[in-house]
Amino acid sequence: MTRLFLIRHGEPEAAWGGAVDDPGLSEGGRAQADVAAAALAGFGPLAILSSPMRRCRETAAPYERKTGLAARVEPSVSEVVAPAGVTDRRSWLRANFPWDSGVARRQWSDVDPALRGWRDSVSSWACSMRQDAAVFSHFIAINALASVAMRSDDTIVCAPGYASITEFEVRDGGLYLIRLGDSMVQGEVR
């Protein structure tokens, strides 16, 4: 059995899909990262993996300092990529992954096959893990894994808050949800 702790990045200094392609953390996001590092310390020795995106690497930094270990950059847990030609990534994200309360959910079976392929690659990566790990990632990637673990076709099955910790187990070739992290505050997707 392998335990995976998926940590959503802390609050970024700018919105994803806005003028800054790869924002770092805001002051509040750095404080959230410190809280997550303290919480992770209670889970025993963990490998550290991070999306290549700056906000995830910066969220991982306090845990790296606490453990003395360096994070390995893992592209498999990076932000979902919009197709070429999409100029308004935020609108594209909302259309494919509607997360607001009261809005109808999209189904993985109804989205572009490339998105299903992305979800399947994230899930395959998780199921291949053989070492307990803290994995610093993104809202949609955590949802991709949670939907697989919950055997749900919804693209959005949870609303992980900034620096929240969602726990999964990998066993017998499958992915299982153990505990959802704290939920986001409405409007917290940036």
Image: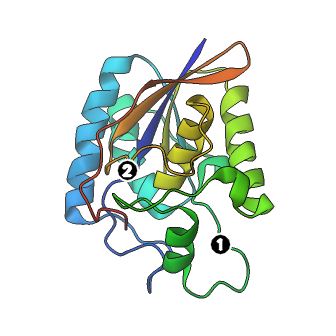
Decide which of 97, 128 is in the foreground and name it.
97
Residue 138 placement (x, y as % from top left): 48, 53
Q: Is residue 81 above or below residue 136?
A: below
Disc number at residue 59?
A: 2
Which residue occupies the foreground of this view, 124 or 113?
113
Amino acid type assigned to the residue bearing label 1 in the image: Ala
Question: Alpha-carbon neighbours of circle 2 within 10 Å: few (<14), some, or many (≥20)?
Answer: many
User: Image quadrant of residue 42?
Assistant: top left
Which disc, if any, is residue 82? Answer: 1
Three-letter amino acid code at disc 2?
A: Thr
Coloring scheme used: rainbow
> Where the N terminus falls, by quadrant?
top right
Whether 3 is drawn above or below 89: the answer is above
> Total number of numbered labels?
2
Query: What is the spatial separation of the Cα atoms under label 1 and label 2, in whole angstroms?
Result: 23 Å
Quarter of the rendering occupied by the C terminus: bottom left
Q: Residue at x 52, y 41 (%)?
A: 71
Q: Front-most of 186 and 29?
A: 186
Sequence-earlier tag: 1 or 2: 2
Residue at the image point whose x is 40% and y is 39% from the top: 64
Please state the horizontal and vertical placement of residue 39, each as a whole percent of the image.
Answer: 27, 29
The residue located at (38%, 48%) in the rendering is: 159
In percent of the image, x 49 and y 77: which residue is there? 90
Relative side of 2 to 85, left or right: left
